[in-house]
Image: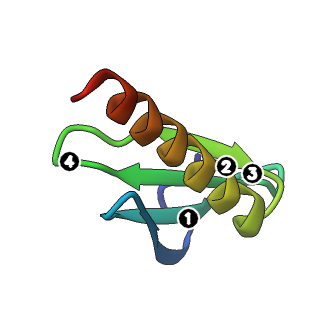
Amino acid sequence: MNRDELIDVREVRSGGRRVVVQLFRNEGGSVAARCVLGEADMPIIDGRSAEEALATVEDAIEGVLLARAATGR
């Protein structure tokens, strides 16, 4: 991830939560989506495009929230 090449900032909403996603252009042309969950909690997901990275983030968040709901967390 090239931290100098921020190309966009978007948000994903899922399960009543709002997650800020910072999109960076990688050297090979793909996109890294850094998910800002908390001050020290920022997982990064790579995709071929911003749309692909955001779709992956949204799917992952929905899966985590469904799993938490199933366990009563």
Q: In this rendering, would 73 be left or right of 5?
A: left
Say what amino acid the circle numbered 3 marks: Glu
Task: Residue at 63% x, 61% y: name it.
Answer: 54
Looking at the image, is mark 3 or mark 4 earlier in the sequence? 3
Q: In this rendering, would 39 be left or right of 19?
A: left
Mark 2 near mark 1, Cβ–Cβ under 8 Å?
Answer: no
Would you name the residue on which mark 2 appears? 56
Q: Nearer the viewer, mark 2 or mark 1?
A: 2
Question: Is 59 situated above or below 72?
Answer: below
CA gap between label 3 and label 1 equals: 13 Å
Q: Is residue 2 visible?
A: no
Would you name the residue on which mark 4 appears? 38
Would you name the residue on which mark 1 appears? 23
Say what amino acid the circle numbered 2 marks: Thr
Mark 4 secondary-structure assignment? loop
Looking at the image, is mark 2 or mark 3 earlier in the sequence? 3
CA gap between label 4 and label 2 equals: 19 Å
Looking at the image, is mark 2 or mark 1 earlier in the sequence? 1
CA gap between label 2 and label 1 equals: 13 Å
CA gap between label 3 and label 4 equals: 26 Å
Judging depth in this view, the residue of 19 and 65 nearest the camera is 65
Residue 43 occupies quadrant = top left
Say what amino acid the circle numbered 4 marks: Gly
Quarter of the image where the C terminus is located = top left
Q: In this rendering, would 20 be left or right of 30?
A: left
Task: Residue at 40% x, 41% y: name it.
Answer: 65
Q: Nearer the viewer, mark 4 or mark 2?
A: 2
